[in-house]
Image: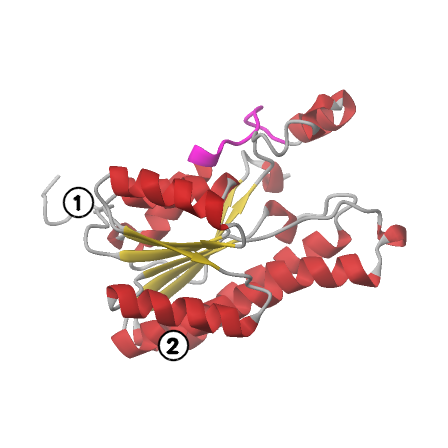
Amino acid sequence: MDKKTSPSFDLTGKVALVTGAGRGMGYDFALALAEYGADLVICSRTLSELEKLRDEILARGQRALAIQTDITRIPEIQAMVAQAVQAFGRIDILVNNAGINIPEFAVDVTEESWDRVMNINLKALFFCAQAVGKVMIAQKGGKIINISSQTGTVAIPRRAAYCSSKGGVNQLTKLLALEWAPYNINVNAVAPTFLETPFTEPMFKDETFRSYVLGNIPLGRLGKTSDVSGAVIYLASPASDLVTGHILLVDGGWTIH
């Protein structure tokens, strides 16, 4: 293939901000972005976890800034973004990863648990996008990647608040893509299926639940964070410059039936 027309996944010289980076998917996304050449701003509520990640990024030869942030507090979001810009001069990529789930049947959902899920999964995600979006509008370009879920497309029991929040993320992704396209900002979402992680390991010890999940995935296996990292790198890179407002399902085929 002609080198001029081959897709580029190179992120050299780019600055990426990842929320919820202290553990799980966010941790792995940050490392993957560093592997492809990006410098990182990483945030979560637990500084010790961020410091470990920061050291791993530095060991890969990339710059890294760890900022302890509670994204449910909008002033802290704004301070984090200001600190990132002060340190690096720009933000090219935002991975809106932070999120929670509180498994409950709909009849048992409390106002407290509903608000907690919505405040982190949807409200905080929006205000992170807004704060970084203002930076990207000023610099006339950027990539925003919202981490959604297949539950934004299909319903799964005991996830009333979670499904609602991720459906909101999908619609918000499309709205921001529409409003910010004139500024050369791509806004997309990645929507994974169930992943095999230390966090979900106890869940899959329930053979009935494991069989239910695998029975709905035509490819016959659970996801890995590396499966989702591949989608994040694609949407962060020049290879996806003509893609915006898209919900990229990484679900093994769950939502096709």
Q: What amino acid is labelled 1 in the image?
A: Ser
| Residue 240 in sight here | yes
Q: Position of residue 179 (x, y in %)?
A: 43, 76
Q: What amino acid is labelled 2 in the image?
A: Lys
Q: Nearer the viewer, residue 61 or 209?
A: 61
Residue 199 located left or right of residue 21: right
Q: Position of residue 43 (x, y in %)?
A: 45, 55
Neighbor class of circle 1 (other Cα within 10 Å; few <14, some 14-19, many 20+) is few
Q: Label 1: state its secondary structure.
A: loop
- Is 11 located above or below residue 202 in the figure? below
Neighbor class of circle 2 (other Cα within 10 Å; few <14, some 14-19, many 20+) is few
Q: Nearer the viewer, mark 1 or mark 2?
A: 2
Name which quarter of the figure residue 183 lies in. bottom left
CA distance separating discs 1 and 2: 31 Å
The residue under label 1 is 6
- Residue 225 drawn in magenta: yes
Which color scheme is applied? secondary structure
Residue range corresponding to the magenta coloring: 217-226
- Residue 14 drawn in magenta: no
Quadrant the C terminus occupies: top right
Count the labels in the image: 2
The residue under label 2 is 134
Which residue appears at 66% of the width and 31% of the height?
216
Which residue appears at 39% of the width and 47% of the height?
232
Q: Position of residue 162 (x, y in %)?
A: 69, 53
Q: Nearer the viewer, residue 177 or 80?
A: 80
State the residue lying farthest toward the right: 107
Residue 131 located left or right of residue 212: left
